[in-house]
Amino acid sequence: MQQARLGRIRVVMQEQGLQALLITNGVNRQYLTGFTGSSGYVLLTEAKAYLLTDFRYMSQAPVQAVHYEVVEHAPKPMETVRALLTKHGISKVGFEKMDMTYGTYLSTAEALQGIELVATGGLVERLRLVKDAAELDVMKEAADLADRTFTHILPFLKPGVKELDIALEIEFFVRKNGAASTSFETIVASGERSALPHGKASDRILQMNEFVKLDYGAYYKSYCSDITRTIVLGKPTDKHKEIYNIVLEAQLTALDKIKPGMTGQQADAIARDVIKQHGYGEFFGHGLGHGLGMEIHEAPRLSTQGDVVLTPGMTVTVEPGIYLPGFGGVRIEDDIVITETGNQKLTHSSKDLIVLD
């Protein structure tokens, strides 16, 4: 798998006219090498692949990065980068402009004086857009764990329980069942707080006759899942039912129609149009979804600004919502993979309006 990725990034380097490429982004480093340590650099040339790291990982790195020559870098890592570039007669190296601060760029330029630095953007990220079979297998497992977590947490949703306690139980369950952590800080938002799209868990106590919105995921084997479900404690009002059913209609319509060949903007419009037709367009203020994989937010975006064309193997969320200040909000979210003919759900928890007495 790593060997295939190495071949693909070298093709990109040739297309960009790069003699060498320096990878400093930690996620990109792991994607290319399989190395899970917290520190290191990848240096690629046309013929050589180096993983530079420090003393702590000199036993671990060769086991994981089997297609790379592992080098223990100097206390100042760019000294080792310079030495390797000089060894191979390379006078120009690409760097990841989105991962390097201006201060780091200046110090890197000084350390590599005489070697031209070429800013590159998103070279590895574009490879990560389309997941291979091994990645999809892991993401299905991460999604399954998110589903099992939803089943587990339902009995804990009771009046008198703090949002924070619900979030803690979610964290405990995903870790106990194989995840390194949740994919992000768990959102538990009840009552009027459910109108906050990213209402992180608080000291608020769950009460009867209100929405409870849960948004969480499992960070499992270096990949993320992301699911949102909204339930009602007690007796739902007509307004609760109305906005829930509109969001559900929007989400189901999008799931039915999203397919390869459309842009993220076109996918977003499918659900957005449903919500607008019901008169709630102004209360759906975020995009329909986002890519996910090794990071919780990746390309492509399903939004009014999403210009990437969806292709088979891309994994995205589909999460329309309606948020009414002072009353509450609903979001329903699933993870999907784009297929040759449409899409396939990775998350499968019930989306019927669950009412807990």
Image (cartoon, helix red, strand yellow):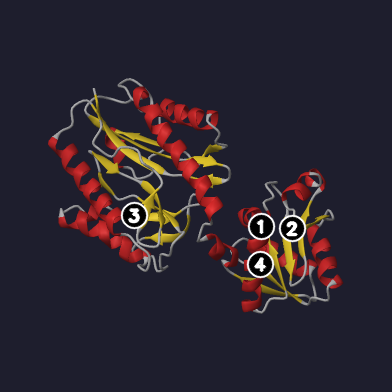
Looking at the rendered image, the disc whose residue lies closer to the viewer, 3 or 4, is: 4
Q: Could you say which disc has been placed on residue 177 in the image?
A: none
Q: Amino acid at mark 4?
A: Gly
Q: Is residue 54 above or below residue 177?
A: below
Residue labelled with disc 3 = 286
Residue at horizontal 28 percent and vertical 33 percent from the top: 231
| Residue 64 appears left or right of 259 | right
Earlier sequence position, callout 2 versus callout 1: 1
Q: Secondary structure at mark 2?
A: loop
Instruction: State the quadrant of the N terminus.
Output: bottom right
Residue labelled with disc 1 = 2
Q: Residues within 10 Å of mark 1 (few under 14, many from 20)?
A: some
Earlier sequence position, callout 2 versus callout 3: 2
Is any part of residue 350 visible from this angle? yes
Report which quarter residue 356 is drawn in. Answer: top left
Earlier sequence position, callout 1 versus callout 3: 1
Residue 229 spot, x, y in % from top left: 33, 39
Residue labelled with disc 4 = 7
In space, the residues marked 2 and 4 are separated at their CA atoms by 11 Å
